[in-house]
């Protein structure tokens, strides 16, 4: 009787190398007897399933009762694919992704080489290659008659037993390629073929099996999604750079006539070209206010594009921190007075000397203090200066509308306004805080803030000093 006769052991598939040292015999024997009787497949776990337990399947076929052990190789493949997916998910650089893909293809299919091919017009190009295909990296070949064209046409895995003996177009371009079996799979995501993944073996190696073909197709499917995302990210970066260049160009073009307009306004206000009435001077004052506002917007756009493209340079000088605070106050106080807000400055008696880019520090403070005035309707705006733990603290406090917790995440994003109503009421580009944080990082400092909705805010610029 199969499975119970001591002269005939049950048929085994798999390996017992990983079986636990102590096997619980009774559950296995019970399963053997029951399956022999009714033919129903049963699951038995050897050892502790929470530790090194191994799941077996007991079934009946023409050979008698069969004990099927787990497919260790398939489990290893699954783990390798999970590892590949994690690797690719954490990488956005296309060149690195292609290298990872070639390595994975060669390793999982036991190949001597691998490559990623892309179609360029009516040509194919090896954009990445390792091992026996490494000498063909960067080379182009005609697509007609190639294995790559067959993959693109069928959208399926294609194999050849002896590539070097097949007179394919790539061999006419790189005759030194010496490989035997070749297996190719499409890199396809969202029904779009991004390229072709190829693996090869040496001349004396066996041909690729159906299982190899399935394995390569799975690897290609994993990789295609990662490559799709990487290409989308690169396109977004290109568009972002184009946006920055456009903003910089337009801002420069606007600044030139605006400077001339401001100059003509000053000539008129000084009555160089003749006396003006009070009503005419009032109109000129309004023109000056609008011109200054437009100039500030242009400067913000220029600063944004410069930061975005990494063109900002730190030019350090020595200065007194209190002098900088007072210079900022001279710009901000008229704005506060216009809104009938109290404005105060608090500086220590002992002078604080520091080395940094004074223009960039001033720009940050004007942005922070200007925001405080803009979003405060009643109460006070205050700039405080102090030195703590080897760092200089510039703090701007206000009694304004404050910031809701739900809006904190978007606070430092470019062009972000926390509320459409506020945008219409207060205006602005939404770049001030983004630029301020970028400049603070450039200076080796940081921006901190505290805020409660309806109770005001405190934004703090912290910069290191020489004695830190």
Image (cartoon, rainbow, N blue to C red):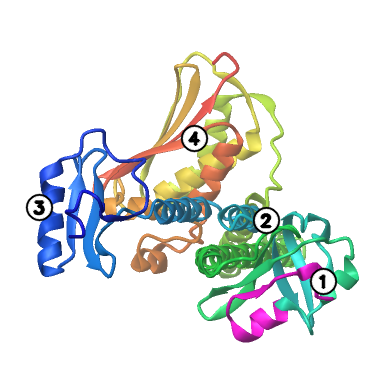
Measure the C-alpha gap from mark 3 to mark 2. 56 Å
Measure the C-alpha gap from mark 2 to mark 4. 34 Å
Q: Is residue 253 left or right of residue 290?
A: right
In the image, residue 442 lies in the stretch drawn in magenta: no
The residues colored magenta run 148-167
Q: Position of residue 348 (x, y in %)?
A: 45, 19
Query: Which corner quadrant holds the N terminus?
Result: bottom left
Q: What residue sits right under mark 1 in the picture?
A: 165
Above or below, comparing residue 443 to residue 138 in the picture: above
Disc nearest the viewer among 3 and 2:
3
Is the residue marked by circle 4 packed among few (<14), some (14-19), or many (20+) residues within 10 Å? Answer: some
Q: What residue sits right under mark 3 in the picture?
A: 30
First in residue order: circle 3 vs circle 2 = 3
Q: Residue at x 69, y 44 (%)?
A: 312
At numbered mark 4, what does the secondary structure look like: helix, strand or loop?
strand
Q: Position of residue 165 (x, y in %)?
A: 82, 71
């Amino acid at each position: 009787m199969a499975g119970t006769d001591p002269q005939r052991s049950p048929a085994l598939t798999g390996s017992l190398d990983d079986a636990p040292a102590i096997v619980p015999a009774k559950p296995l024997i019970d399963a053997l007897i029951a399956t022999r009787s009714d033919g129903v497949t049963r699951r038995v776990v050897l050892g502790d399933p929470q530790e090194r337990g191994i799941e077996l399947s007991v079934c009946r076929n023409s050979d008698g009762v069969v004990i099927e052990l787990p497919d260790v190789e398939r489990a290893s493949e699954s783990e390798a694919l999970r590892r590949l997916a994690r690797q690719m998910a954490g990488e956005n650089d296309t060149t690195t992704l292609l290298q990872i893909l070639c390595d994975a293809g060669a390793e999982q299919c036991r190949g001597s080489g691998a490559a990623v091919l892309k179609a360029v017009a009516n040509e194919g190009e090896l954009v990445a290659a390792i091992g026996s295909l490494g000498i063909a990296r960067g080379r182009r070949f005609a697509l007609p008659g190639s294995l790559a064209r067959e993959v693109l046409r069928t959208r399926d895995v294609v194999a050849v037993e002896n590539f070097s003996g097949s007179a394919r177009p790539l061999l006419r371009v790189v005759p030194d390629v010496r490989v035997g079996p070749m297996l190719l799979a499409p890199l396809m995501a969202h029904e779009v073929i991004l390229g072709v993944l190829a693996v090869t073996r040496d001349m004396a190696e066996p041909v690729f099996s159906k299982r190899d073909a399935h394995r390569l197709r799975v690897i290609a499917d994993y990789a295609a999604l990662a490559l799709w995302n990487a290409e989308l990210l690169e396109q977004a970066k290109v568009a972002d750079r184009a946006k920055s260049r456009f903003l910089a160009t337009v801002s420069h073009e606007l600044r030139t006539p605006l400077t001339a307009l401001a100059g003509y306004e000053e000539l008129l206000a000084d009555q160089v070209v003749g006396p003006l009435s009070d009503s005419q001077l009032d109109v000129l004052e309004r023109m000056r206010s609008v011109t200054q506002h437009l100039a500030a917007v242009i400067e913000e756009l220029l600063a944004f594009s410069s930061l975005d493209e990494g063109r900002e340079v730190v030019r350090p000088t020595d200065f007194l921190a209190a002098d900088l605070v007072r210079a900022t106050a001279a710009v901000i106080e008229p704005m506060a007075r216009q809104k009938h807000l109290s404005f105060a400055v608090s500086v220590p008696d002992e002078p604080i000397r520091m080395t940094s880019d004074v223009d960039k520090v001033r720009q940050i403070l004007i942005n922070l203090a200007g925001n405080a005035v803009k979003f405060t309707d009643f109460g006070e705006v205050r700039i405080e200066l102090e030195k703590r733990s080897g760092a200089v603290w510039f703090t701007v406090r206000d009694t304004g509308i404050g910031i809701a917790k739900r809006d904190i995440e978007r606070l430092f994003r470019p062009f972000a306004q926390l509320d459409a109503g506020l945008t219409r009421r207060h205006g602005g580009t939404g770049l001030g805080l983004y630029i301020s944080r970028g400049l603070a990082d450039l200076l080796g400092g940081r921006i901190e803030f505290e805020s409660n909705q309806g109770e005001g805010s405190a934004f703090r610029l912290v910069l290191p000093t020489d004695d830190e």
